[in-house]
Image (tube, rainbow, N blue to C red):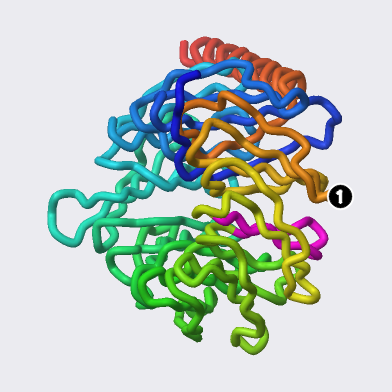
Amino acid sequence: MKKYYLSSLLIGFAFASSALAQTLFVPARYSDEVAVIDTSTNQVVTQIPVGTFPIRIAMTPNRLKAFVSNGTSASISVLDTVARTNTATIPVARVPGESAITPDGNRLFVLHQHGTGIPNQCPVEVIDTATNQIITTVIIPGHWAKEILFTPDGRFAYIANFSNDTVDVIDTTTYGVTSIPVGDGPRRLCMSATGDRVYVTNYNGGSVSVINTATQQLIATIPVGLSPEGIGITPNGQEVYAGNLRTDNVSVINTATLTVVATIPTGDRPQRVVFSNDGSEAFVTNAGTSNNVSVINTATHAVIKTIPVGDNPFVMLVNPNGTKVYVTNSADTTISVIDIPSLTVSATIPDVGSAPLVPVVHQARRQLLRHHRHQQQQQQQHQHQHQHLDRFSSLAAR
Protein backbone atom coordinates (compact mmCIF):
# COMPACT_ATOMS: atom_id res chain seq x y z
CA MET A 1 0.00 0.00 0.00
CA LYS A 2 1.24 3.47 -0.83
CA LYS A 3 2.69 5.34 2.18
CA TYR A 4 1.32 8.84 2.73
CA TYR A 5 2.10 11.41 5.35
CA LEU A 6 -0.71 13.26 7.02
CA SER A 7 -0.06 16.75 8.13
CA SER A 8 -1.49 18.76 10.99
CA LEU A 9 -5.22 18.13 11.02
CA LEU A 10 -7.48 20.72 12.57
CA ILE A 11 -10.88 19.29 13.31
CA GLY A 12 -14.15 21.13 13.34
CA PHE A 13 -17.26 19.07 14.03
CA ALA A 14 -20.94 19.93 13.85
CA PHE A 15 -23.26 17.07 14.72
CA ALA A 16 -27.02 17.06 14.30
CA SER A 17 -29.25 15.87 17.11
CA SER A 18 -30.49 13.13 14.80
CA ALA A 19 -29.30 9.57 15.30
CA LEU A 20 -28.52 9.38 11.58
CA ALA A 21 -24.91 9.02 10.49
CA GLN A 22 -22.71 12.10 10.43
CA THR A 23 -20.08 12.83 7.79
CA LEU A 24 -16.51 13.98 8.26
CA PHE A 25 -14.80 16.13 5.61
CA VAL A 26 -10.98 15.87 5.71
CA PRO A 27 -8.59 17.79 3.43
CA ALA A 28 -5.72 15.57 2.28
CA ARG A 29 -2.75 17.83 1.75
CA TYR A 30 -0.61 15.84 -0.68
CA SER A 31 -3.38 14.16 -2.67
CA ASP A 32 -5.19 17.45 -3.36
CA GLU A 33 -8.59 16.18 -2.28
CA VAL A 34 -11.06 16.15 0.58
CA ALA A 35 -11.97 12.77 2.02
CA VAL A 36 -15.59 12.26 3.04
CA ILE A 37 -15.95 9.80 5.94
CA ASP A 38 -19.10 8.15 7.22
CA THR A 39 -18.61 8.20 10.99
CA SER A 40 -21.13 5.41 11.53
CA THR A 41 -18.95 2.97 9.58
CA ASN A 42 -15.61 4.81 9.92
CA GLN A 43 -15.07 4.44 6.18
CA VAL A 44 -14.10 6.89 3.43
CA VAL A 45 -17.09 7.07 1.06
CA THR A 46 -15.69 9.48 -1.54
CA GLN A 47 -12.86 11.89 -2.35
CA ILE A 48 -13.54 15.41 -3.65
CA PRO A 49 -10.79 16.94 -5.84
CA VAL A 50 -9.78 20.46 -4.78
CA GLY A 51 -6.78 22.74 -5.33
CA THR A 52 -3.16 21.95 -4.55
CA PHE A 53 -2.01 21.46 -0.97
CA PRO A 54 -5.36 21.85 0.83
CA ILE A 55 -4.52 22.68 4.43
CA ARG A 56 -7.63 24.06 6.18
CA ILE A 57 -11.40 23.78 5.92
CA ALA A 58 -14.26 25.83 7.34
CA MET A 59 -17.97 25.05 7.15
CA THR A 60 -21.00 27.35 7.28
CA PRO A 61 -23.25 27.03 10.36
CA ASN A 62 -26.04 25.49 8.25
CA ARG A 63 -23.48 22.87 7.12
CA LEU A 64 -24.38 23.25 3.42
CA LYS A 65 -21.06 24.70 2.22
CA ALA A 66 -17.42 24.17 3.08
CA PHE A 67 -14.44 26.31 2.10
CA VAL A 68 -11.01 24.74 1.64
CA SER A 69 -7.75 26.73 1.76
CA ASN A 70 -5.43 25.49 -1.01
CA GLY A 71 -1.98 26.45 0.23
CA THR A 72 0.03 26.39 -3.00
CA SER A 73 -2.61 27.17 -5.62
CA ALA A 74 -3.61 30.46 -3.97
CA SER A 75 -7.29 29.60 -3.99
CA ILE A 76 -10.30 28.57 -1.95
CA SER A 77 -12.35 25.58 -3.10
CA VAL A 78 -16.08 25.76 -2.38
CA LEU A 79 -17.76 22.44 -1.59
CA ASP A 80 -21.43 21.54 -1.71
CA THR A 81 -21.61 19.23 1.30
CA VAL A 82 -24.93 17.70 0.23
CA ALA A 83 -23.90 16.81 -3.33
CA ARG A 84 -20.30 16.28 -2.14
CA THR A 85 -18.88 18.20 -5.08
CA ASN A 86 -16.48 21.07 -5.69
CA THR A 87 -18.68 23.87 -7.04
CA ALA A 88 -16.38 26.89 -7.29
CA THR A 89 -12.81 28.14 -6.97
CA ILE A 90 -12.08 31.56 -5.46
CA PRO A 91 -8.66 33.07 -6.31
CA VAL A 92 -6.96 34.63 -3.27
CA ALA A 93 -3.49 35.81 -2.29
CA ARG A 94 -0.51 33.50 -1.82
CA VAL A 95 -0.43 30.74 0.81
CA PRO A 96 -3.94 30.83 2.26
CA GLY A 97 -4.07 29.07 5.61
CA GLU A 98 -6.33 29.37 8.62
CA SER A 99 -9.86 30.56 7.99
CA ALA A 100 -13.05 31.10 9.96
CA ILE A 101 -16.68 31.90 9.23
CA THR A 102 -18.57 34.57 11.14
CA PRO A 103 -21.15 33.25 13.63
CA ASP A 104 -23.99 34.39 11.34
CA GLY A 105 -22.50 32.36 8.50
CA ASN A 106 -22.33 35.28 6.06
CA ARG A 107 -18.59 35.88 5.71
CA LEU A 108 -15.41 33.82 5.49
CA PHE A 109 -12.15 35.40 6.73
CA VAL A 110 -9.00 33.89 5.18
CA LEU A 111 -5.55 34.31 6.74
CA HIS A 112 -2.24 33.91 4.93
CA GLN A 113 1.16 32.55 5.86
CA HIS A 114 2.82 34.87 3.39
CA GLY A 115 2.82 38.63 2.91
CA THR A 116 1.62 40.64 -0.07
CA GLY A 117 5.15 41.19 -1.37
CA ILE A 118 5.16 44.64 0.19
CA PRO A 119 7.11 44.67 3.48
CA ASN A 120 5.01 44.33 6.63
CA GLN A 121 1.71 43.68 4.85
CA CYS A 122 -0.32 40.51 5.21
CA PRO A 123 -3.76 40.12 3.59
CA VAL A 124 -6.97 38.88 5.16
CA GLU A 125 -9.64 38.28 2.52
CA VAL A 126 -13.29 38.65 3.50
CA ILE A 127 -15.54 36.50 1.30
CA ASP A 128 -19.31 36.51 0.96
CA THR A 129 -20.31 32.89 1.61
CA ALA A 130 -23.48 33.20 -0.47
CA THR A 131 -21.92 34.66 -3.63
CA ASN A 132 -18.33 33.39 -3.19
CA GLN A 133 -17.14 36.93 -3.98
CA ILE A 134 -14.38 38.79 -2.13
CA ILE A 135 -15.99 41.71 -0.28
CA THR A 136 -12.75 43.33 0.83
CA THR A 137 -9.15 42.60 1.72
CA VAL A 138 -7.97 43.78 5.12
CA ILE A 139 -4.25 44.38 5.51
CA ILE A 140 -2.62 43.49 8.82
CA PRO A 141 1.07 43.96 9.68
CA GLY A 142 3.66 41.22 9.29
CA HIS A 143 3.71 38.28 6.90
CA TRP A 144 2.54 35.20 8.81
CA ALA A 145 -0.87 34.99 10.48
CA LYS A 146 -1.58 31.76 12.36
CA GLU A 147 -5.09 31.57 13.85
CA ILE A 148 -8.38 33.47 13.92
CA LEU A 149 -11.31 33.46 16.36
CA PHE A 150 -14.49 35.54 16.41
CA THR A 151 -16.16 36.94 19.49
CA PRO A 152 -19.52 35.25 20.12
CA ASP A 153 -21.42 38.22 18.66
CA GLY A 154 -19.20 38.21 15.57
CA ARG A 155 -18.23 41.87 16.00
CA PHE A 156 -14.48 41.29 16.31
CA ALA A 157 -11.99 38.83 14.84
CA TYR A 158 -8.85 38.07 16.88
CA ILE A 159 -5.79 36.94 14.91
CA ALA A 160 -2.53 35.45 16.20
CA ASN A 161 0.07 37.34 14.16
CA PHE A 162 3.13 35.11 14.51
CA SER A 163 5.56 37.31 12.58
CA ASN A 164 4.55 40.60 14.21
CA ASP A 165 4.34 39.55 17.89
CA THR A 166 0.81 40.92 18.08
CA VAL A 167 -2.77 39.83 18.28
CA ASP A 168 -4.56 41.82 15.61
CA VAL A 169 -8.23 42.65 16.09
CA ILE A 170 -10.43 43.31 13.04
CA ASP A 171 -13.68 45.18 13.57
CA THR A 172 -15.99 43.16 11.31
CA THR A 173 -18.25 46.17 10.78
CA THR A 174 -15.68 48.80 9.78
CA TYR A 175 -12.76 46.47 8.94
CA GLY A 176 -10.51 48.65 11.07
CA VAL A 177 -7.49 46.94 12.67
CA THR A 178 -6.14 47.24 16.21
CA SER A 179 -2.81 45.58 17.03
CA ILE A 180 -2.19 44.39 20.60
CA PRO A 181 1.49 43.65 21.45
CA VAL A 182 1.91 40.23 23.10
CA GLY A 183 4.86 37.84 23.52
CA ASP A 184 7.29 36.50 20.95
CA GLY A 185 5.66 34.38 18.24
CA PRO A 186 1.94 34.21 19.07
CA ARG A 187 0.73 30.90 17.67
CA ARG A 188 -2.65 29.65 18.92
CA LEU A 189 -5.71 31.19 20.57
CA CYS A 190 -8.57 30.21 22.81
CA MET A 191 -11.45 32.33 24.07
CA SER A 192 -13.66 32.21 27.13
CA ALA A 193 -17.23 31.12 26.50
CA THR A 194 -18.53 34.63 27.11
CA GLY A 195 -15.87 36.14 24.86
CA ASP A 196 -14.50 38.45 27.55
CA ARG A 197 -10.93 37.08 27.38
CA VAL A 198 -8.58 35.76 24.73
CA TYR A 199 -5.56 33.60 25.63
CA VAL A 200 -2.64 33.24 23.22
CA THR A 201 0.40 30.95 23.30
CA ASN A 202 3.65 32.75 22.51
CA TYR A 203 5.66 29.98 20.87
CA ASN A 204 9.03 31.71 20.88
CA GLY A 205 8.51 33.52 24.18
CA GLY A 206 7.53 30.61 26.43
CA SER A 207 4.46 32.40 27.71
CA VAL A 208 0.71 32.84 27.48
CA SER A 209 -0.72 36.33 27.00
CA VAL A 210 -4.18 37.28 28.24
CA ILE A 211 -6.30 39.95 26.53
CA ASN A 212 -9.37 41.73 27.88
CA THR A 213 -11.71 41.93 24.88
CA ALA A 214 -13.79 44.77 26.34
CA THR A 215 -10.77 47.09 26.44
CA GLN A 216 -8.68 45.23 23.84
CA GLN A 217 -5.75 45.50 26.22
CA LEU A 218 -3.13 43.01 27.38
CA ILE A 219 -3.77 42.25 31.05
CA ALA A 220 -1.17 39.54 31.78
CA THR A 221 1.74 37.58 30.34
CA ILE A 222 2.23 34.26 32.15
CA PRO A 223 5.50 32.28 31.87
CA VAL A 224 4.94 28.62 30.97
CA GLY A 225 7.20 25.94 29.41
CA LEU A 226 9.23 26.10 26.21
CA SER A 227 7.48 26.47 22.86
CA PRO A 228 3.84 26.48 23.94
CA GLU A 229 1.50 25.90 21.03
CA GLY A 230 -1.86 24.19 21.59
CA ILE A 231 -4.17 25.85 24.10
CA GLY A 232 -7.66 25.23 25.43
CA ILE A 233 -10.00 26.40 28.17
CA THR A 234 -12.01 24.06 30.40
CA PRO A 235 -15.79 24.05 29.88
CA ASN A 236 -16.33 25.79 33.23
CA GLY A 237 -13.83 28.49 32.24
CA GLN A 238 -11.74 28.07 35.39
CA GLU A 239 -8.50 26.81 33.83
CA VAL A 240 -6.48 27.12 30.64
CA TYR A 241 -4.20 24.30 29.48
CA ALA A 242 -1.15 25.05 27.28
CA GLY A 243 0.97 22.30 25.70
CA ASN A 244 4.71 23.00 25.83
CA LEU A 245 6.40 21.23 22.91
CA ARG A 246 10.03 21.46 24.03
CA THR A 247 9.53 20.69 27.72
CA ASP A 248 7.10 17.80 27.20
CA ASN A 249 4.51 19.05 29.65
CA VAL A 250 1.27 20.98 30.01
CA SER A 251 0.94 24.19 32.01
CA VAL A 252 -2.37 24.71 33.81
CA ILE A 253 -3.38 28.35 34.36
CA ASN A 254 -5.99 29.44 36.89
CA THR A 255 -8.13 32.02 35.07
CA ALA A 256 -9.01 33.86 38.29
CA THR A 257 -5.45 34.41 39.53
CA LEU A 258 -3.77 34.19 36.09
CA THR A 259 -1.02 32.02 37.54
CA VAL A 260 0.28 28.55 36.71
CA VAL A 261 -1.18 26.15 39.28
CA ALA A 262 0.18 22.88 37.85
CA THR A 263 2.74 21.55 35.40
CA ILE A 264 1.85 18.08 34.13
CA PRO A 265 4.42 15.81 32.41
CA THR A 266 3.14 14.25 29.18
CA GLY A 267 4.68 12.43 26.23
CA ASP A 268 7.00 13.83 23.59
CA ARG A 269 5.95 17.17 22.11
CA PRO A 270 2.43 17.75 23.48
CA GLN A 271 0.70 19.45 20.60
CA ARG A 272 -3.02 20.05 21.17
CA VAL A 273 -5.52 19.76 24.00
CA VAL A 274 -9.29 19.17 24.12
CA PHE A 275 -11.68 18.47 26.99
CA SER A 276 -14.49 16.03 27.63
CA ASN A 277 -17.90 17.68 27.60
CA ASP A 278 -18.16 17.64 31.39
CA GLY A 279 -14.62 18.99 31.74
CA SER A 280 -13.44 16.10 33.90
CA GLU A 281 -10.76 14.98 31.45
CA ALA A 282 -8.26 16.69 29.18
CA PHE A 283 -6.84 14.88 26.13
CA VAL A 284 -3.36 15.85 24.89
CA THR A 285 -1.79 14.63 21.64
CA ASN A 286 1.91 13.82 21.97
CA ALA A 287 3.08 14.54 18.44
CA GLY A 288 6.71 13.46 18.75
CA THR A 289 8.07 9.95 19.15
CA SER A 290 5.50 8.94 21.78
CA ASN A 291 2.64 8.47 19.31
CA ASN A 292 0.01 8.54 22.03
CA VAL A 293 -2.60 10.65 23.78
CA SER A 294 -2.28 11.61 27.45
CA VAL A 295 -5.54 11.71 29.41
CA ILE A 296 -5.47 14.12 32.37
CA ASN A 297 -7.88 14.21 35.30
CA THR A 298 -8.62 17.94 35.54
CA ALA A 299 -9.49 17.73 39.25
CA THR A 300 -6.19 16.14 40.30
CA HIS A 301 -4.02 17.42 37.43
CA ALA A 302 -2.64 13.90 36.98
CA VAL A 303 -2.28 11.74 33.87
CA ILE A 304 -4.70 8.81 34.35
CA LYS A 305 -4.21 7.03 31.01
CA THR A 306 -1.85 7.01 28.06
CA ILE A 307 -3.51 5.77 24.87
CA PRO A 308 -1.40 4.57 21.91
CA VAL A 309 -2.65 5.94 18.58
CA GLY A 310 -1.15 6.39 15.10
CA ASP A 311 2.06 8.01 13.91
CA ASN A 312 2.51 11.66 14.98
CA PRO A 313 -0.96 12.42 16.42
CA PHE A 314 -1.89 16.04 16.05
CA VAL A 315 -5.36 17.57 16.27
CA MET A 316 -8.41 16.20 18.13
CA LEU A 317 -12.06 16.91 18.63
CA VAL A 318 -14.70 15.53 20.96
CA ASN A 319 -18.08 14.70 19.43
CA PRO A 320 -21.05 16.65 20.86
CA ASN A 321 -22.49 13.82 22.91
CA GLY A 322 -19.11 13.39 24.59
CA THR A 323 -18.53 9.74 23.71
CA LYS A 324 -15.69 9.93 21.15
CA VAL A 325 -12.43 11.77 20.50
CA TYR A 326 -11.21 11.86 16.90
CA VAL A 327 -7.41 12.03 16.61
CA THR A 328 -5.61 12.84 13.37
CA ASN A 329 -2.34 10.96 12.90
CA SER A 330 -0.25 13.32 10.83
CA ALA A 331 2.48 10.91 9.66
CA ASP A 332 0.27 8.07 8.45
CA THR A 333 -3.09 7.83 6.68
CA THR A 334 -5.40 7.28 9.62
CA ILE A 335 -7.66 8.87 12.20
CA SER A 336 -7.89 7.19 15.61
CA VAL A 337 -11.27 7.13 17.36
CA ILE A 338 -11.05 7.08 21.17
CA ASP A 339 -14.01 5.82 23.16
CA ILE A 340 -14.23 8.19 26.15
CA PRO A 341 -16.03 5.91 28.65
CA SER A 342 -13.41 3.15 28.26
CA LEU A 343 -10.46 5.37 27.27
CA THR A 344 -9.50 2.97 24.50
CA VAL A 345 -9.18 3.21 20.72
CA SER A 346 -12.47 1.86 19.42
CA ALA A 347 -11.66 2.28 15.72
CA THR A 348 -8.98 3.38 13.29
CA ILE A 349 -10.24 5.03 10.10
CA PRO A 350 -7.95 3.92 7.24
CA ASP A 351 -6.99 5.43 3.88
CA VAL A 352 -7.97 8.99 4.75
CA GLY A 353 -5.56 10.32 2.12
CA SER A 354 -2.18 11.93 1.78
CA ALA A 355 -1.66 14.33 4.70
CA PRO A 356 -5.29 14.89 5.74
CA LEU A 357 -5.96 18.21 7.45
CA VAL A 358 -8.77 20.02 9.27
CA PRO A 359 -11.74 17.70 9.04
CA VAL A 360 -15.25 18.98 9.62
CA VAL A 361 -18.39 16.98 10.35
CA HIS A 362 -21.78 18.14 9.17
CA GLN A 363 -25.40 17.09 9.60
CA ALA A 364 -26.76 13.80 8.42
CA ARG A 365 -27.04 13.70 4.63
CA ARG A 366 -30.80 13.03 4.66
CA GLN A 367 -31.39 15.97 7.00
CA LEU A 368 -29.26 18.25 4.82
CA LEU A 369 -31.12 17.18 1.69
CA ARG A 370 -34.43 18.13 3.32
CA HIS A 371 -32.98 21.50 4.35
CA HIS A 372 -31.54 22.03 0.85
CA ARG A 373 -34.90 21.27 -0.82
CA HIS A 374 -36.64 23.62 1.62
CA GLN A 375 -34.23 26.42 0.68
CA GLN A 376 -34.84 25.75 -3.04
CA GLN A 377 -38.61 25.89 -2.49
CA GLN A 378 -38.26 29.20 -0.65
CA GLN A 379 -36.13 30.62 -3.47
CA GLN A 380 -38.71 29.50 -6.05
CA GLN A 381 -41.49 31.14 -4.00
CA HIS A 382 -39.48 34.38 -3.80
CA GLN A 383 -38.86 34.29 -7.55
CA HIS A 384 -42.58 33.75 -8.21
CA GLN A 385 -43.45 36.68 -5.93
CA HIS A 386 -40.94 38.93 -7.69
CA GLN A 387 -42.30 37.92 -11.11
CA HIS A 388 -45.83 38.70 -9.94
CA LEU A 389 -44.74 42.10 -8.61
CA ASP A 390 -42.86 42.85 -11.82
CA ARG A 391 -46.01 42.13 -13.88
CA PHE A 392 -48.11 44.26 -11.52
CA SER A 393 -45.61 47.15 -11.73
CA SER A 394 -45.55 46.89 -15.53
CA LEU A 395 -49.37 47.10 -15.73
CA ALA A 396 -49.47 50.01 -13.25
CA ALA A 397 -46.95 51.95 -15.33
CA ARG A 398 -49.09 51.84 -18.48
In the depicted structure, whether residue 346 falls above or below residue 162? above
Q: Nearer the viewer, residue 16 or 131?
A: 16
Q: Residues within 10 Å of mark 1 (few under 14, many from 20)?
A: few
Describe the element under mark 1 as helix, strand or loop: loop
List x then y, in percent, for residue 276: 76, 57
Question: Picture coordinates of residue 71 (x, y %)?
Answer: 33, 37
* Left or right of 143 on screen, residue 191: right
Q: Is residue 155 visible?
A: yes
> Considering depth in this image, is 388 or 341 the residue closer to the camera?
341
**Residue at 56%, 12% in the rendered image:** 387
Front residue of 58/257: it is: 257
Q: Residue furthest left?
A: 118
Residue 154, image quadrant: bottom right
Check the image and report above or below for 381 versus 56. Answer: above
- Decide: is 115 above or below 105: below
Q: Which residue is mark 1?
A: 341
* Image quadrant where residue 167 sits: bottom left
Residue lying furthest front: 289
Q: Is residue 328 left or right of residue 43?
A: left
Magenta residues span 273-286
Report the side of 262 relative to 198 (left or right).
Answer: right
Q: Position of residue 25 (x, y in %)?
A: 58, 30
- Determine which quarter of the picture holds residue 328: top right
Q: Is residue 18 left or right of residue 5?
A: right
Answer whether residue 33 is magenta in the image: no
The answer to whether residue 106 is visible is no
Across and down, in percent, residue 216 comes to 46, 76
Q: Residue at x 67, y 59 (%)?
A: 294
Q: Amino acid at mark 1?
A: Pro
By secondary structure, the bulk of the magenta-drawn segment is best described as strand
Residue at 34%, 42% (x, y): give it: 96
